[in-house]
Amino acid sequence: MIADRSLWLGVLLGLLGGVRIWSMAASGAASLPHILAALTVLVPLTLFGVFLRRAWPAGLALAIVVAIELSLA
């Protein structure tokens, strides 16, 4: 399990998405519905990627979080 690079890449992408959500919330750029929508996408897709041992669901979740962030600007 420790040597599975796609698993760790998926977890790292999920953490990166969490940092982006946290920064949106801390800066005040996103209201509660935007934060909850981003978390609703990020958490299940990251966990699904960990279950599959693939990185693409977490990458997709990160792309959706970035799209939510760009829609606020």
Image (cartoon, grey):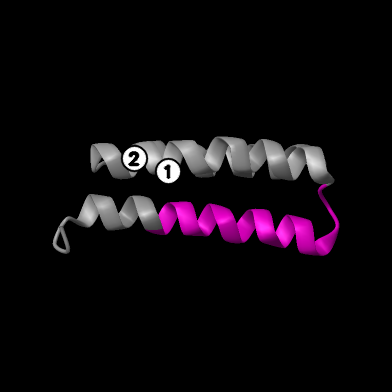
Q: Are marks 1 and 2 in contact (CB under 8 Å)?
A: yes
- Taking depth in this image into account, of 53 and 63 the one nearest to the observer is 53
Res 21 label: none
Q: Residue at x 39, y 42 (%)?
A: 47
Magenta part, dominant SS: helix
The reply to whether the magenta stretch includes residue 24 is: yes
The alpha-carbon separation of the residues under discs 1 and 2 comes to 5 Å
The answer to whether 73 appears left or right of 10 in the picture is right
Residue underneath mark 2: 49
Residue 55 shows in the view: no
SS at mark 1 in the image: helix
- Residue 25 in the image: above or below residue 43: below
Residue 43 place in picture, x, y as percent: 51, 43
SS at mark 2 in the image: helix
The answer to whether 39 appears left or right of 35 in the picture is left
Magenta residues span 12-30
Residue underneath mark 1: 46
Circle 1 packing at 10 Å, graded few (<14), some (14-19), many (20+), is many
Q: Residue at x 52, y 44 (%)?
A: 62
Residue 33 place in picture, x, y as percent: 79, 37
Residue 24 place in picture, x, y as percent: 74, 56
Quadrant position of residue 23? bottom right
Q: Residue at x 26, y 51 (%)?
A: 7
Image quadrant in which the N terminus is located: bottom left
The reply to whether the magenta stretch includes residue 27 is: yes
Identity of the amino acid at label 2? Answer: Gly
The answer to whether 53 appears left or right of 17 in the picture is left
